[in-house]
Image (cartoon, helix red, strand yellow):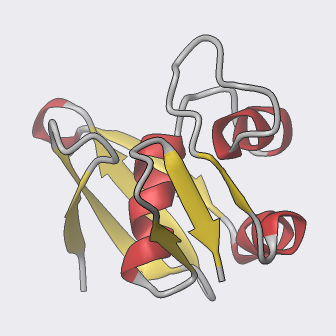
Amino acid sequence: MAKTLQTWAGRSSFVYDGSVSQGTEIRYGKDHRWRLNISREQYEALLKYFKNRTVNIGTSRTDPPLGSVGEWLQNNVTLTATASYIGPILIHEGYAERVSTPSKIRFV
């Protein structure tokens, strides 16, 4: 069943099917017409890399901060800026949480 979430900044919504443990198809943009698939293995690698850390989410489309989730995703998954979607999915499914600093995410 598709789930609708707000992007990291809360300015728009996106839809995803699947789960972190099975892989996801993310639909975003106007009328959710763009699609992106993230595999279970890619999520596993992301979670292993950031385990128990608090880092910058890195939602910049062109220049995510060094060491951020956005930089990792661009280097390891896709050049498309996806941190705005991946962060909310990880939080929704209990793999991470927001912290008091708006740009930070804590992996649990």
Q: Is residue 56 above or below residue 45?
A: above
What is the tally of numbered marks visible in this picture? 0
Indicate the quadrant where residue 51 lies. bottom right
Query: Position of 103 compared to 44: left or right?
Result: left
The residue drawn where x is 29% and y is 47% is: 7
Instruction: List x then y, in percent, for residue 106.
Output: 60, 67
Foreground pick, 98 / 4? 98
Q: Nearer the viewer, residue 62 or 65?
A: 65
Q: Residue at x 40, y 57 (%)?
A: 100
Q: Is residue 14 above or below residue 39?
A: above
Percent x, y of residue 41 = 81, 73
Q: Residue at x 75, y 45 (%)?
A: 77
Above or below: residue 75 compared with residue 83? above
Which residue occupies the extreme front position in the image?
100
For residue 95, side relative to residue 75 (left or right): left
Q: In the orientation shown, which residue stands out farthest toward the top?
A: 62
Q: Quadrant of residue 102?
A: top left
Q: x, y (%) of residue 42? A: 77, 64
User: Residue drawn 24% across and 76% down?
Assistant: 2
**Residue 21 to residue 48: above or below:** below
Q: Percent position (x, y) of residue 1?
A: 24, 86
The quadrant of the rendering that contains the C terminus is bottom right
